[in-house]
Structures are given as structure tokens and as C-alpha cells.
């Protein structure tokens, strides 16, 4: 064996549960789209691989915010309603498109897809996690955790109690969800800072992932670069991202998803069709958004878009899987010839790229592992903990702060668009730690309820998603509102506690507003 492929998917969404609001929050649709276009298609691909007796190894993170939402009954029921609407729209499209044979074929294609998605979702009793657990149990899938609310840990370095709370809640939620302790973690935004390994070791975490430059810039410079794990202290290993395999998927210029045969993400009937026709299938306030019915392919760089052909796209996915595998074999051969050691090629991606942004992504994954299983014997897929035991030699070094964001450090999460956030983050984080010590192990149930909810609000406040959205300039109003809401609720609860005036009705309302982590105990902030 000349090499090992570590294929990693990071599945994450911020906590976007807003029960009882009319009209509904558009942001709740993020979860519906991710389930329909990424998580269920991935699960279907895993099942196809298993049915064909294909050996595969994939590492996948499920963040605590995501698994909480996936197992939330309110959100599960909303997803069923979402699918029912798409099925109704698809039926309507089957009737509307009879004038064009190819459009009619595509409308029937989507109708079948949505019906099959609903059938699978209901067969799992609306619990996607149970579907993935089958592959955890048979060893095909290694699930890893993340920080509680995906807080960017380098920005929280000055508050150790907050870093511990993010990691502790991440570990506990993983154990509750999967029934096993996590051995690995996806550090939010791959954000590492020197000394973080000690906090990870305290949680029993053995490995995490970083961007390429984090390994290459470590001291002393590692002999095997990113092609072997790096022991950085406390028995914790860092795995570095391979740039070549990343570029083949991520790159806007050379990446596979830009192939002209693939489905065009930005052409959707939610925007293309007349308002009167589509109004019942978009936001009640008339805000247009994607329905998932997309009839065009990328075609080229001009605005002209030809019709989508699923069979052409399937052929492209097979071709690209073959190219990806061939490239990894070439990399492994080159490394092995020089170092006389198998190359470890780490390819981490946001899970939502596969299916949501790149519609054919799950198909690509399926083809890739079939080709790896049947067409060659030079490299094989592996989980990170297997790698540590398989390699004849490992390397040890010391790393500095890094992330996988633009420019490689903290520029995305701390800049003029979002720096105002941190005044609130630190004010609430410091207060949470102080109050935890004052009320540690209190037996007063009302105090505990208030403190537990304060802990939930401050964790949600710390999410890296809010400053990221502000930097990207997308739904900035929503992100800013979330910062203010969590800060204000935290301060309101703090005032109740300090005045010893617990407003039971108001406390219950806040608990119902953000019921994330019902098992949380505020002492994690000690």
C-alpha cells in the first residue's frame, strides 16, 4: 500500500430554530435544504456502497447545533411539510411542462426524487441520525464532534472557561447522540491556537484537522509535511489539508463542480417563474427563494443556460471520480518513492458542498469509493485513528495559530464588519464564568434554570457563523439580530438572578425560545 485517503466531511449549520413566528424565518429553510440536498443523498450513496459490498471509510463531523436540530420534533415536522410542498409543486410542474418533453421529463425526475426523499425520511422515523448510525456501527463512518455552537476558538483564547465549555458540551452531545466518546474533533473553521491541544486531551480528543500552512509553518518543519499526521503535544495529532485534492473540488477555476454538464445552482423556478404561479411555494411575504427545481446546467460562462441532462451529469461525476483517484495515486507514488513511507492524503470539505452546492457531489463520492474498491490496489481509504497505528514513522512539532479561512488566520472572523460583536461576547462570557463560581452546585432550582439558560444564550452568542455572515455580506441583518437577541436575553436573565426576582413566565418563554442542549448544566463554565 503506497497511500491512504482520508476523506472528511464537515456537516454543520448554526442553530436556526424559530418556533411560533409568523411569517416563518427564511433561515429555517437552510436546514430543510441541507437535509433534502446533502444529508439524505449522502445517506443514499452510503447505502448504495454497502449494498454493492464496497469497502469505504469516511470521517464526518456532525456539529452539536446540527444534531440538536436534526432531532428536534418541530423541525422534523417542518421538513415533512417542506417536502409536501415540493411534491405539490412538482405535480403542478408536470402538468405545466407538457409543452416541452425535456422539461416534462425533468419535472417528473424531481417529483420522483422528492417522493423518494420523503419515503426514506419517514422510514427513519424522521431521524436522520439513526440512518448514519448504521455506518458508524459497521465501521464505514467515523463520526467526530465539534465545539458546542461552532465558536471560533482562537478568538476565545483569553477565556479558558469558555473554551472548555465549548469543548465539553461538544463531547457530551456527541456521546449522547452516538453512544460513544469522540476520538476526533472538527475545530470550528479549523481554528487552532497554541496550547489548545491540552484542552482537547482533557476531553479525550486524539486528533483534529488544520489547513496546509499550519503544518508547513510548524517548528521544527515536519519531514513529511502534510503527508503524515503531526503530534503536537499531549498525545494529540493534527492532520493537514492536502491542497491539490482540495483545489480539484473547491477551486472556482479548475474545480470539478464548474463542469458545464453539472446542474446550475443559480437557476431555480423560485426565481424564474411568474410570481402568481410560484407565490404559494416561496416566502409568505413574497420573498423569492430556491425551491430545488432547477432545469438548467452550467453550460458555460455566459448568462445563457441550456437544459440539464442528469445522464450527462452522471457521466461527468464518474469521469471526475476517476481523475480524482488517479491524481491521488500519482501523489502517493511520488511521495512514497522519496520517503519510502505511505502518503496520507487528507481531503476535508464542507459536507453541504456535496449535494446542495454541487448537486452531483454525493454521486461523485459513490463513484470514487467504487473505483477505489474495484479498480486499483495502491491506495485505500482510512480513518485518522487507523493512520496513527499504520504508519511506521510519525512526526512531532509545535504549531502556531491558524484557520482555513481567507488568508489563513483570523481575518474572516475579526475585521471591521464584525469586530463590534466581541464586546458582547466577552462581556457575557466573563460574567458567565464569574456567576458560575458564585452559584456553583446551587440546589435552588430556579437559580439553576436561569443559569442554565444563560449558558445556552452565551454559547449561541459565540457561534462563528454570525461574524462569518457579516464578513460575507449575505444575511447580515439576521446575523446582527442574533448577536443582539442572545446578548439581551443573557443580560435579562442575569438581572433576574442578581435581583433574586425570577419571572417564571418570562423564564419559561426564553427556555422555549432557545431550547438547545436541554441536558446542559451551567457548571461547564467553571
Image: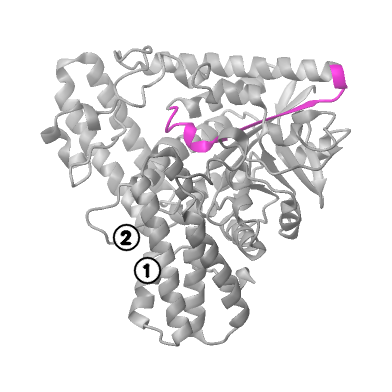
Q: Is disc 2 surrounded by few (<14), some (14 to 19) or many (20+) residues within 10 Å?
A: some
Magenta region: 338-358
Q: Secondary structure at mark 2?
A: loop
Residue drawn where x is 49% and y is 29% of the image: 362
Q: In what quadrant of the picture does the C terminus appear?
A: bottom right
> Residue 368: which disc?
none
Quarter assignment of residue 487: bottom left
Name the residue that disc number 2 marks.
19
Image x and y of residue 494, in percent: 46, 76
Q: Horizontal placement of 353 versus 22: left or right?
A: right
Q: Horizontal placement of 260 versus 303: left or right?
A: right
Residue drawn where x is 67% and y is 62% of the image: 160
Q: Which of pointers 1 and 2 lies earlier in the amino acid sequence?
A: 2
**Mark 1 vs 2: CB contact within 8 A:** yes
Name the residue that disc number 1 marks.
512
Q: Nearer the viewer, residue 423 or 224?
A: 423
What is the tally of numbered marks visible in this picture? Answer: 2
Q: How is the image coloured?
A: one colour
Q: Horizontal placement of 95 versus 129: left or right?
A: left
Magenta stretch holds residue 354: yes
Answer above or below: position of 220 versus 439: above
Answer above or below: position of 210 versus 380: below
Amino acid at each position: 500500500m503506497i497511500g491512504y485517503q482520508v476523506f472528511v466531511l464537515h456537516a454543520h449549520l448554526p442553530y436556526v430554530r424559530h418556533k411560533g413566528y409568523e411569517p416563518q424565518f427564511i433561515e429555517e429553510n437552510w436546514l430543510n435544504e441541507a437535509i433534502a440536498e446533502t444529508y439524505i443523498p449522502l445517506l443514499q450513496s452510503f447505502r448504495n456502497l454497502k449494498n454493492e459490498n464496497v469497502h469505504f471509510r469516511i470521517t464526518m463531523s456532525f456539529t452539536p447545533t446540527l444534531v440538536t436540530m436534526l432531532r428536534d420534533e418541530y423541525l422534523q415536522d417542518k421538513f415533512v411539510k417542506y417536502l409536501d410542498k415540493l411534491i405539490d409543486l412538482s405535480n403542478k410542474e408536470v402538468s405545466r411542462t407538457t409543452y416541452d418533453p425535456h422539461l416534462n421529463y425533468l419535472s417528473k425526475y424531481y417529483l420522483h426524487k422528492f417522493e423518494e426523499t420523503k419515503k426514506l425520511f419517514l422510514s427513519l422515523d424522521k431521524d436522520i441520525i439513526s440512518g448514519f448510525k448504521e455506518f458508524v456501527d459497521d465501521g464505514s463512518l467515523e463520526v467526530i464532534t465539534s465545539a458546542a455552537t461552532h465558536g471560533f476558538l482562537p478568538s476565545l483564547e483569553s477565556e479558558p472557561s469558555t473554551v472548555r465549555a465549548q469543548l465539553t458540551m461538544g463531547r457530551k452531545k456527541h456521546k449522547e447522540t452516538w453512544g460513544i466518546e469522540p476520538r476526533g474533533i472538527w475545530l470550528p473553521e479549523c481554528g487552532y491556537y497554541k496550547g489548545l491541544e491540552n484542552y482537547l486531551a482533557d476531553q479525550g480528543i486524539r486528533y483534529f484537522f488544520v489547513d496546509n500552512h499550519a503544518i508547513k509553518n510548524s517548528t521544527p518543519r515536519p519531514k513529511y509535511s502534510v503527508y503524515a499526521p503531526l503530534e503536537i503535544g499531549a498525545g494529540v495529532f493534527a492532520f493537514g489539508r492536502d491542497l491539490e485534492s482540495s483545489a480539484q473540488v473547491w477551486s472556482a477555476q479548475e474545480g470539478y463542480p464548474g463542469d458545464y454538464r453539472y446542474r446550475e445552482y443559480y437557476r431555480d423556478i423560485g426565481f424564474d417563474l411568474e410570481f402568481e404561479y410560484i407565490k404559494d411555494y416561496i416566502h409568505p411575504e413574497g420573498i423569492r427563494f430556491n425551491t430545488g427545481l432547477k432545469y438548467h446546467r452550467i453550460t458555460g460562462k455566459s448568462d445563457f443556460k441550456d437544459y440539464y441532462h442528469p445522464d450527462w451529469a452522471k457521466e461527468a461525476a464518474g469521469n471526475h471520480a476517476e481523475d480524482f483517484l488517479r491524481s491521488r495515486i500519482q501523489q502517493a507514488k511520488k511521495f512514497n518513492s522519496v520517503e519510502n513511507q505511505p502518503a496520507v492524503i487528507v481531503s476535508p470539505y464542507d459536507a453541504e458542498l456535496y449535494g446542495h452546492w454541487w448537486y452531483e457531489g454525493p454521486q461523485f463520492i459513490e463513484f470514487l469509493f467504487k473505483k477505489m474498491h474495484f479498480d486499483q490496489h495502491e491506495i485505500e481509504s482510512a480513518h485518522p485513528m487507523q493512520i496513527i497505528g499504520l504508519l511506521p514513522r510519525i512526526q512531532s512539532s509545535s504549531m502556531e495559530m491558524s484557520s482555513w479561512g481567507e488568508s489563513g488566520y483570523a481575518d474572516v472572523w475579526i475585521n471591521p464588519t464584525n469586530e463590534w460583536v466581541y464586546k458582547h461576547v466577552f462581556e457575557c462570557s466573563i460574567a458567565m464564568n464569574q456567576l458560575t463560581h458564585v452559584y456553583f452546585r446551587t440546589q435552588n432550582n430556579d437559580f439553576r434554570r436561569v443559569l442554565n439558560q444563560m449558558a445556552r444564550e452565551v454559547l449561541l452568542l459565540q457561534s462563528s457563523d454570525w461574524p462569518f455572515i457579516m464578513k460575507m455580506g449575505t444575511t447580515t441583518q439576521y446575523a446582527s439580530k442574533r448577536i443582539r437577541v442572545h446578548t439581551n436575553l443573557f443580560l435579562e436573565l442575569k438581572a433576574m438572578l442578581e435581583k433574586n426576582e425570577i419571572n417564571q413566565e418570562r423564564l419559561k418563554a426564553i427556555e422555549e425560545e432557545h431550547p438547545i442542549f436541554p441536558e446542559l448544566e451551567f457548571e461547564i463554565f467553571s
